[in-house]
Image (cartoon, helix red, strand yellow):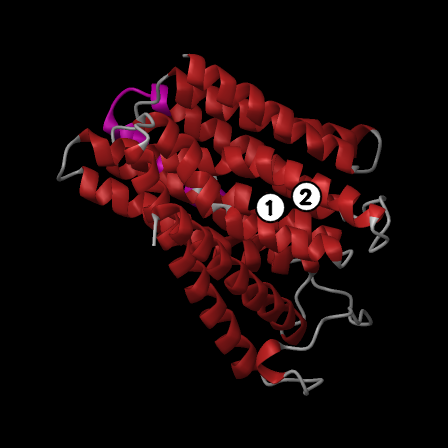
Amino acid sequence: MTAWAWLLVSLGIILVGCDLFTNGIEWAGKKLSLSEGAVGSVLAAVGTCLPETLIAVLAIVFGRHAGAGGEGIGIGAILGAPLMLSTLAFFITGAAVLLFSLTGRRTVQMQVDHRVVGRDLRFFFVVFAMAAVASFLPGRTWNYVAAAALVILYGLYVYRTFAERGAPDRDEDISPLHFRRRSDNPPLWTVLTQVVIGLCVLMFGAHLFVGELTDIGAATRIPLLVLSLILTPIATELPEKFNSVLWVRQGKDTLALGNISGAMVFQSSIPPAIGLAFTRWDLDRQAIACVVVALASAAAAYMEMTWRKRLSPWSLLLGGVFYTVYIVWVLRA
């Protein structure tokens, strides 16, 4: 099979993994009486972030032994992930809302818990800006301090998210667990087994996708920066995008947006902390511009929630504009 064919196969694997994972994580949240914010912003977000985080870490580790190339790929993957989430993932989610509303599956109005998504975006603004500013700090000692601060801030974010408990009388409409479709109350061990298997399928599919994408990039002579900062995150962020589309179709907008915004907080704190601790973290103008565009796209959605007290698919579609502008600028630079 050609690299393009394997690319499509890996995409199918990711879709299967997403379906298993999202279904299982919803049941896990229900069994543990967690809020939608905890399920979408932490459990689902961190779980689907693992493939790209692992790729970035491996690139950094091998980069320490094989020159700056691997390190550059790792840094590009670290910064590219929040960019993809705050632009392309927002765009796809907004487009999905409009598409499903046209087909009658849902309404165009989005029912989003602004406290959940707003909290996520506020943390994102702080930690991602801090990660970018850290590249200008003098000496490795300050890098370690900044890395520790990012980890502590993410810990605070997780604590505040889990502190919000779900309403005891809420009974959400959840599809039957795939591993126990005839059971109305599957045991927790079955739920967790499906979550783990779904996550493994996700990681395998994302790893295969990135490998084939890398081969295609080498064959087409795509520059290393474009490959690491743009193309690789597109592949590794597919789980968040597909998970959110699945939840949007079901009208679970808080889970859909929380999955993306929670992943944004994780991707802009923990992976940059690893980069700060184990690389030179010397960001060039393309990398700094990546941070600026990601923050601007997220700010567009945040301002609508703050000023108009709502979130519409139209502000999410602006993410596609920010993404396109950045891509054009990078290709011309």
Query: Which residue is found at the position 58% from the left and 70% from the top?
Result: 24
Q: Are marks 2 and 1 in contact (CB under 8 Å)?
A: yes
- Kind of residue indicated by mark 1: Ile
Magenta residues span 135-153
Query: Which residue is found at the position 49% from the left and 25% from the top?
Result: 291
What percent of the width, then of the height, locates residue 52? Answer: 40, 47
* Mark 2 secondary-structure assignment: helix
Give the residue at mark 2: 93
- Which picture quadrant has residue 89? top right
Residue 14 vertical position relative to residue 310 in the rendered view, above or below: below
Q: Examine the structure image and report whether residue 249 is included in the region drawn in magenta.
A: no
What percent of the width, then of the height, locates residue 148? Answer: 37, 41
Residue 291 vertical position relative to residue 38 in the rendered view, above or below: above
Depth check, mark 2 against mark 1: the one in front is 2
- Which picture quadrant has residue 202? bottom left
- Kind of residue indicated by mark 2: Thr
Quarter of the image with the N terminus is bottom left
Residue closest to the eye, 100 or 157: 100
Category of crowding for the residue at label 2, using alpha-carbon neighbours closer than 10 angstroms: few (below 14), some (14–19), many (at least 20): many
Give the residue at mark 1: 260
